[in-house]
Image (cartoon, rainbow, N blue to C red):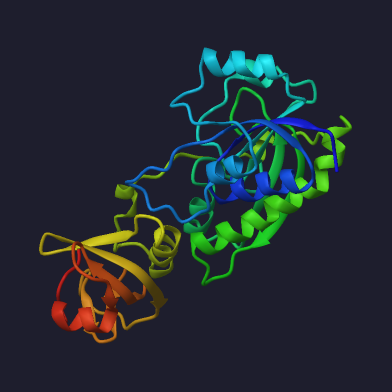
Amino acid sequence: MTDLRAAVFAYSEVGYVCLEELLRRGVTVEALFTYEDDPGEEIWFPSVAKLGREAGIPVHTPVSLGNDEYELLLSLRPDVIFSFYYRSMIPERFLRIPPLGAFNMHGSLLPRYRGRACINWAVLKGEHETGATLHRMVRRADAGDMVDRERVPILFEDTAFDVGKKVAGAARLLIARNLDAIAAGRAARIPQNEEEATLFGRRTPADGKIDWSLDATEIYNLVRAVTHPFPGAFAFREGKKLFIWNALPEECPVDGSPPGTVLSPSPLRVKAGTGCLRILRAQVEGEPEEDGGTLGKTIGKGSLLE
């Protein structure tokens, strides 16, 4: 148990488990800043707002962080600020309020994969591991001194959703492991090596467009990086969008057909720049999802996916 008083900014799965851990350890959360769920977004994670309200925490869902929120924090005078997957930048003046500092949980092994959608990017790039990093917050995003990191593996068959679950578990461990040191004002300060830093931007649904000239494994990595519950990888067939939800890279005979050519309908195999992609689950936009072999019989051998 601890008498630590905190202001928490949180959302998504990592936000939920980290807030849950703070409450389990007896932290007094003076204010919780989060978001109302977007009805246009597939919500696959538990509600931080619901957890906060059930715990009797004052919950705030501002569109942006401005003077009202700043004055509120000044009046509350929390010992510490925690940010767990909050989607907006917290202004620097907010970070200067708590005497013990402000700490963020990031879903990568900093300094690599700073920025947005870090788990999706790590899967897309074919990484074999990622993790969570607890670090101090400064004006620049994800650039402050690290407190601790926890590694998790990325298996070849893992989707971004699978990896996100692992990262959430790692984030909970980091809070449990470092909370006493934070409360005592002696949390570690490990400078980030700027020469090793990589930065990635936000992703949009349009970024799921498949480039068939790429290696089949690269296309596979895109598929698993953006499959459910994310917007999905897609191609076009006769002007209709075709979502590919599950696939595997395979070797295939070299022939003169261009990338994107359907080499066989069942199993559904599509030629890539190198190798081919066996499509296991797919969906024509507006129609039910189906297995690749069933869809392949409709598409037909020799067809071209754009």
Q: Nearer the viewer, residue 44 or 47?
A: 47
Q: Quadrant of the C terminus?
A: bottom left
Q: Where residue 94 appears, x then y in whole percent?
A: 63, 19
Looking at the image, can residue 187 be seen?
Answer: no
In percent of width and height, residue 300 lies at 14, 81
Q: Is residue 39 above or below residue 223?
A: above
Q: Image height check: is 41 above or below 66?
A: below
Q: Please state if 88 lies on the left or on the right of 219 as rendered.
A: right
**Horizontal and vertical percent for residue 8?**
64, 33
Quarter of the image where one finds residue 276: bottom left
- Image side of residue 90 versus residue 297, left or right: right
Q: Position of residue 166 (x, y in %)?
A: 62, 60
Residue at 29% x, 63% y is 212
Closest to the observer, 102 or 130: 102
Mark yes or no: residue 289 visible. yes
Q: Quadrant of the N terminus?
A: top right
Closer to the camera in the image, 185 or 222 = 185
Residue 226, image quadrant: bottom left
Which residue is depicted at the point 35% across and 62% down? 214
